[in-house]
Image (tube, rainbow, N blue to C red):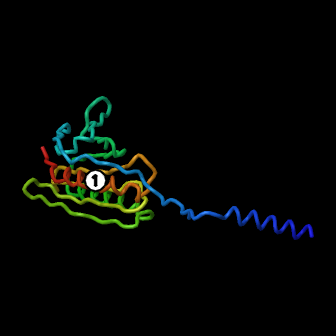
Amino acid sequence: MIKLIGSALILTILLCSCGGDDLLIPKPPTYLRTDFPEHSYRKVSEASTYSFEMSKIYFSKQIMYQGKATDHAEINLGPLNGVLYLNYYPIPNRDTLVRYINLSNDKVDEHQIKATKISDQNFIFPGKKVYGTLFELEGNVATNFQFYLTDSTSHFLRGEILMNCRPNYDSLRPSLNYLKADLIHLIETVEWK
């Protein structure tokens, strides 16, 4: 009899606690919404061997070595929370050019383990003697964009973008799409001095 009363009491409590028409659904995952400004550019010519246009929301800093300015640059990507590293190398001979191109390709290949897709886009501007390749790496990789530019005789410029956060491609995609437009503009406006 006590078991029957106890069971009835538990059943009554369970039935009373299950009332209501509210259907509880877990919230879907959300990501930070980022509003980006319109693209606008300014000319940067701090290096002695090249110039380019970059977004006005970015800040350029020339790299110093032993108290002297170099042709390397570090571009802070401002609200995108990343850095574009530009490394310039003179080309003394044809073998050096081949070595630099192979080195750039090897740097991209280092990310094949984590990348879900690697695509490239060639740039050829014979009037300005600017030739190069932009690599876009998709997936949770350390660097989503790398590129190199050359005139094939004297100048070689290599760039790599690193974001200052844990690589989560889905979260970074809006920022990367915005950044890609700025990066393509930078590449298209490079001029050798």
Residue indicated by mark 1:
178
**Residue 137 position within the rendered picture, expressed as x and y whole percent measured from the top left:** 35, 61
Q: Which residue appears at 15% of the width and 50% of the height?
A: 189
Q: Quadrant of residue 148?
A: bottom left
Q: Residue furthest top?
A: 67
Depth order, front residue of 14/76: 14
**Residue 87 position within the rendered picture, expressed as x and y whole percent measured from the top left:** 28, 46
**Residue 105 position within the rendered picture, expressed as x and y whole percent measured from the top left:** 32, 61
Considering only vertical position in the picture, is 169 above or below 43? below
Q: Is residue 52 left or right of residue 112?
A: left
Q: Secondary structure at mark 1?
A: helix
- Residue 50 showing in the rendered view: no
Q: Quadrant of the C terminus?
A: top left
Q: Which residue appears at 24% of the width and 60% of the height?
A: 133
Q: Is residue 46 left or right of residue 28?
A: left
Q: Residue furthest right?
A: 1
Q: Quadrant of the N terminus?
A: bottom right
Q: Is residue 86 left or right of residue 24?
A: left
**Residue 26 position within the rendered picture, expressed as x and y whole percent measured from the top left:** 54, 61
